[in-house]
Image (spheres, rainbow, N blue to C red):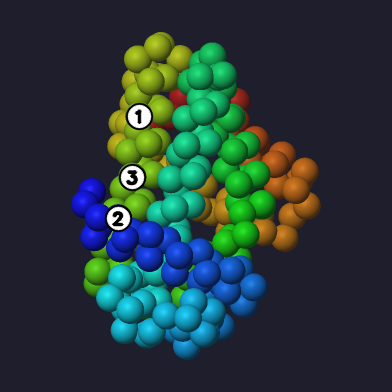
């Protein structure tokens, strides 16, 4: 990275950090570009130059959040001896991160809000593709180790991601201990099912 690129990244980070405080305080919808201009001391043109839109700026923060999550997972993944333990560990990290991250409320507004521009939709789609790829790798490890039955890994990864998204939305009003128990039970259902008779079509 050359000096100009480094300065550009530093400016983006500075703008994003100042904007993050606004999103945390006011939420996504209530934070305007004018608010961001006032908080950062930057011009509207400079913000649009670096991020193109408020949506682009917020996605930058979401990308940061994802990188932090991946670094946190990478630091503890080796502590889980089996793929089954990793699924339970994944559920625990997801709920604790969801409950404690300052951008959770604003992110809910962002993802459930108005229709996004095509470039934003593409970036969101790419983000979910990364999540699904992560799930696929986790599930494939379990198949390779003999812990999980041979199955359609792509479908299982989509089912796991859909479960995670649904839990995130449906557990918002639960107490932390109850939410954690729900996530752990969901991990158990994903791993073992609920039917007494294990035959299925």
| Circle 1 SS class | helix
Mark 1, Cα crowd under 10 Å, few <14 / some 14-19 / many 20+, is: some
Mark 3 highlights which residue? 130
Q: Is residue 165 above or below residue 151?
A: below
Viewer-closest of 101 and 9:
9
Q: Position of residue 105 (x, y in %)?
A: 60, 66
First reached walking from the N terminus: tag 3 or tag 1: 3
Say which mark, if any, is on residue 161. Answer: none
**Element marked by disc 2:** helix
Q: Position of residue 73 (x, y in %)?
A: 51, 33
At 36% from the left and 51% from the top, the residue drawn is 128
Instruction: Classify 10 Å Cα crowding around label 3: few (below 14), some (14-19), many (20 and above).
Output: few
Furthest residue toward front: 3
Is mark 3 in CB contact (under 8 Å) with mark 2? no
Q: Mark number for residue 6?
A: 2
Residue that label 1 marks: 137
Instruction: Look at the picture and state if 196 lies above or below 184.
Output: above
Q: Nearer the viewer, residue 54 or 168?
A: 54
Callout 3: SS: helix
Distance in Å between CA atoms under marks 3 and 1 = 11 Å
Residue 28 placement, left or right of 127: right
Name the spot of residue 98 as percent of width and height, x first.
60, 51
**Front residue of 74 and 193:** 74
Locate residue 42: give its quadrant: bottom left
Q: Residue at x 30, y 63 (%)?
A: 8
When the figure is inspected, residue 141 is found, relative to residue 89, above or below; the finding is above
Q: Foreground residue, 23 or 158?
A: 23
């Amino acid at each position: 990275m050359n000096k100009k690129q480094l300065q550009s990244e530093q400016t983006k980070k500075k703008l994003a950090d100042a904007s993050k405080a606004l999103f945390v305080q006011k939420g996504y919808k209530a934070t305007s570009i004018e608010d961001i201009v006032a908080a950062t001391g930057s011009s509207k043109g400079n913000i649009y130059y670096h991020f193109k839109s408020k949506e682009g700026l917020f996605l930058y923060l979401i990308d940061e959040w994802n990188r932090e999550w991946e670094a946190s997972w990478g630091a503890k993944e080796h502590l889980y001896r089996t793929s089954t333990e990793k699924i339970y560990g994944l559920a625990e990290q997801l709920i604790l991160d969801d409950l404690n991250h300052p951008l959770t409320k604003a992110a809910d507004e962002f993802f459930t809000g108005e229709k996004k521009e095509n470039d934003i939709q593409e970036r969101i789609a790419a983000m979910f593709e990364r999540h699904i790829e992560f799930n696929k790798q986790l599930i494939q490890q379990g198949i390779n180790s003999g812990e999980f039955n041979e199955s359609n890994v792509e479908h299982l990864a989509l089912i796991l991601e859909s479960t995670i998204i649904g839990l995130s939305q449906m557990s918002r009003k639960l107490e932390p201990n109850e939410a954690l128990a729900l996530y752990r039970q969901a991990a158990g259902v994903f791993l073992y099912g609920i039917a007494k008779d294990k035959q299925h079509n």
